[in-house]
Amino acid sequence: MAIRYTNEVVGSYSRQTNCEAGIYVDGDIAGLVQYVLYDQELTISHIFVRPEYRRQGYGSRLMKYIQKENPDYKYKPSMMTDDGAAFKHKDLPLENKFVSFNNWLSEKQVEEALHTSGTPTDSSPSTYDRSPKGSNYKSQFPIAESEEKEEKEEKEEDPKYGCVMMDANIKNWEDFHLAGIDKDDVYYKPYDQSYGLEENPHVTILYGIHEEEVDPQRMADMIEFYMKPVTVTIEEIGVFEGEEYDVVKYNIPITGQLQKYRDVFIQVPNTQNFPEYQPHMTIAYVKSGEGKKYATKLREPFRVEFTKGVYSWHSSPEKDPEKTSRKVVNLAKKEEEKEKDKDKGVGLPPNIENLPLNNVENGLPPNIQK
């Protein structure tokens, strides 16, 4: 597969430069991006990817390319869809197939990009208007318009939930654990950074928390009060198989601690599509059908200590639906401080001293919920 790029200045006025770049796969155009250079900043106006090339990382490669072509300009994430969703992209290889300003996108190539079949339709323009005034790129690129609508519908249908998890501190996670995943198997999803290789090893305690019904700080208080570091032994790699992607993960045995923490947090308002608790530590999201080849018993089991409790939620659902924030509690440090406080005779902080301990049947205290 040969990937090459084009880059072109399509207009310039008042210290603003309007540009357009394209990405080609084996000679066929896969996508276009229109961007602006102004005041030492690079912002995106629109990005279009043909339907047959969607969810394969070409938009992300195109973003990386234009940043490399304009090293003196700082990339500023900008709004590019009708619902105000910011473009999210992974750091993918460019395949070293560059075409710079010496080989700009021709009118013929643009015309070909407007049709998936190469045959003009009634909605397709006879010419491509690059005029900076009054240009309606969506009407000139009907493929991109329908794609944006589909992406918007997907976002509206996908509910956002909060999550309680425990982070692990694993040395050489990237070099040793992630290196075993073939890069050609990795699954990426445009506009969503939660797929691909897992950069932050963790075990989920409870996903599906109704963010609008709980206070993040109260969730952090619960984590600090109930949770302690957890140590487990990893013996095998498993896989969750799906139609869209597979999840390659380390299987984690259910310990008394993990089950207790789930029993505590499942009392907050939540939605569960998978009631059975299967603790695991995700390694990577891979293309559907590719996960099973990674499932295996480890020849050398290893121990993992989860030392941080985390509540993750979507802090700006209206402005940036994919942006998440985290409340992190250092459980190891907390235990050390608790031992010191015992020696000094110091009690629990006032805001959590009345919470029920080891008695989840009593329910959560009122101050946990908003």
Image (cartoon, rainbow, N blue to C red):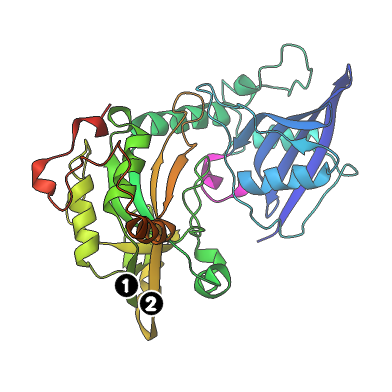
The reply, left or right, for residue 304 in relation to residue 83 is left
> Where residue 220 appears, x then y in whole percent?
36, 42
Asked if the residues shown at circle 1 and circle 2 are in contact, with their CB atoms under 8 angstroms apart, the answer is: yes
Residue visible at 20% across and 30% down? 366
Q: Amino acid at mark 1?
A: Val
Residue visible at 30% across and 46% down? 348
Q: Is 285 colored magenta in this rendering?
A: no
Considering only vertical position in the picture, is 35 above or below 101?
above
Q: Amino acid at mark 2?
A: Arg
- The picture quadrant where one finds residue 266 is top left
Q: Nearer the viewer, residue 90 or 276?
A: 276
Residue visible at 32% across and 63% down? 280
Within 10 Å of disc 2 (Cα), the crowding (few <14, some 14-19, many 20+) is few
Q: Nearer the viewer, residue 347 or 273?
A: 347
For residue 43, the mark is none
For residue 232, the mark is 1
Residue visible at 91% across and 44% down? 102
Q: From which residue to which does the magenta span run?
A: 50-58
Q: Is residue 210 visible?
A: yes
CA–CA distance in space, label 1 to label 2: 6 Å
Residue furthest out toward the left: 361
Image quarter where the N terminus lies is bottom right
- Identify residue for label 2: 303
The reply, left or right, for residue 134 in relation to residue 225 is right
> Where residue 41 appears, x then y in whole percent?
79, 31
Within 10 Å of disc 1 (Cα), the crowding (few <14, some 14-19, many 20+) is some
Residue furthest out toward the top: 134
